[in-house]
Image (spheres, rainbow, N blue to C red):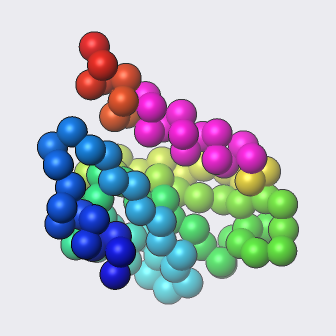
Amino acid sequence: DILKEVGEKKQYNQVLVGFALETNNELENAKKKLDSKNADCIILNSLNDKGSGFNVDTNKVTIIDKNRIIELPLKTKVEVANDIVSYIFNTFIKKSSI
């Protein structure tokens, strides 16, 4: 379990982002992973959402951190990637560089 091992070695100034592909109890399982892996956030992918997953150019993800849950609408995978990077920068990086 790579995420767990990295989470155990995480330093105070590091940001750990994990991904969870869930099909049942998606939100509950992703929240458990957030805590058990010592991650700063989890990007939840669900195969239950139409237009997301494999063999399509779109995805719908939920960003989960210790304080909030952000459900993103169905977007292109490039847009989703940009949203994830923007979230990480604005939530963790920008704050620490001030």
Q: What residue sits 60% from the left and 40% below the top? A: 83
Question: Residue 69, image x and y in percent?
Answer: 41, 51
Q: Residue furthest top?
A: 98
Q: What residue sits 34% from the left and 34% below the top? A: 92
Q: What residue sits 79% from the left and 51% below the top? A: 76
Question: Residue 18, image x and y in percent?
Answer: 41, 62
Q: Is residue 84 visible?
A: yes
Pick the quarter of the image with the C terminus.
Answer: top left
Q: Is residue 64 above or below residue 82?
A: below
Q: What residue sits 31% from the left and 46% below the top? A: 15
Q: Is residue 29 left or right of residue 53?
A: left
Question: Residue 66, image x and y in percent?
Answer: 26, 51
Q: Is residue 81 above or below residue 30?
A: above
Check if residue 42 falls in the magenta segment. no
Check if residue 86 falls in the magenta segment. yes
Q: Nearer the viewer, residue 65 or 94?
A: 94
